[in-house]
Amino acid sequence: MGFERRKKEILSLLAEKEFITASDLVQHLGVSDITIRRDLSQLESLHLLKRTHGGATRIDENPMVSFDLKSSQNEAEKLKIGEAAAKKIKDRDVVFIDCGSTTLHICSHIRNLNIKVITNSLPVVSVLQNSKVKVNLIGGELDSKRQAVHGKMAVNHINQYHANKAFIGADAIDKDGNLWANSETEAEISRAMIDASDKTYVCADSSKKGKKGYLKFAKKMEVEQTIS
């Protein structure tokens, strides 16, 4: 098992527990204690966890979870959502895809389509490069932790375009179907994509349902469908 696979497993375990011991990781991953110590040191250098005596703990206790940690949560469900969302996209569409860990899973299913994708997500660009898709990376300030571009210039960039469809995520969807975010910077990107699109689809796993977040950025009536 390579480092990237071990990283995903470690972050997935930390998404379920706030603390995990090195000995548990050795047993779970079937590798040596030296390998685990090296992995934890590398993940700490990437600011994905904090090493403690005997193991590691989550460092991101605020709602702005790093992309690597978010992408490891509910992965099987997100894969299904990505596949279902991709079926909404047709040849010659112009599509916004935001930086969500769920919307990323759309990309592997659309590589052979003759479409344009406008995105603020570096992972989306990475998956779609060398495909038939024409990719427009939104300009602005890079958030290396979220692997995405945000800020006023990014919003201005989005405002220059018109898309057939937008695929966005949400940190929470309340019982009335309204969309909530835990970050103003991400909310303003999603809001701009909604305003610049004919239709908006929300890609959200079951952990987001029936909750409220820090900031409400869209009403249910503004969304074509929630794909979950």
Image (cartoon, rainbow, N blue to C red):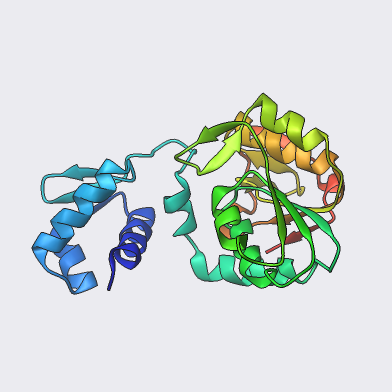
Which residue is located at x 83 percent, y 68 percent?
Answer: 90
Q: Position of residue 115 (x, y in %)?
A: 79, 62
Compared across the picture, whether 27 is left or right of 121 comes to left
Q: Is residue 21 visible?
A: no
Residue 212 vertical placement versus 94 (above, below): above
Residue at horizontal 72%, vertical 31%? 155
Please tell me whether residue 216 is drawn above or below residue 36 in the rendered image: above
Where, by quadrant of the figure, is residue 212 drawn?
A: top right
Q: Is residue 107 left or right of residue 26?
A: right
Q: Is any part of residue 46 visible from this angle?
A: yes
Residue 166 drawn at (x, y percent): 78, 51
Image position of 120 (left or right of 218): left
Instruction: Name which residue lies at 71% across and 43% down.
Output: 179
Q: Quarter of the image for the N terminus: give it.
A: bottom left
Q: Position of residue 194 (x, y in %)?
A: 80, 43
Q: How many numbered circles are shown?
A: 0
Dividing the image into 4 quarters, which one contains the C terminus? bottom right
In the displayed orientation, state which residue is furthest to the right: 198
Vertical side of 116 occupied by 195: above or below: above
Q: Quadrant of residue 164?
A: bottom right
Choose between 4 and 30: the one closer to the eye. 4
Residue 85 at what x, y percent from top left?
A: 72, 66
Q: Residue at x 10, y 63 (%)?
A: 33
Residue 93 vs residue 32, the one in the foreground? 93
Name, please, the residue furthest toward the front: 130
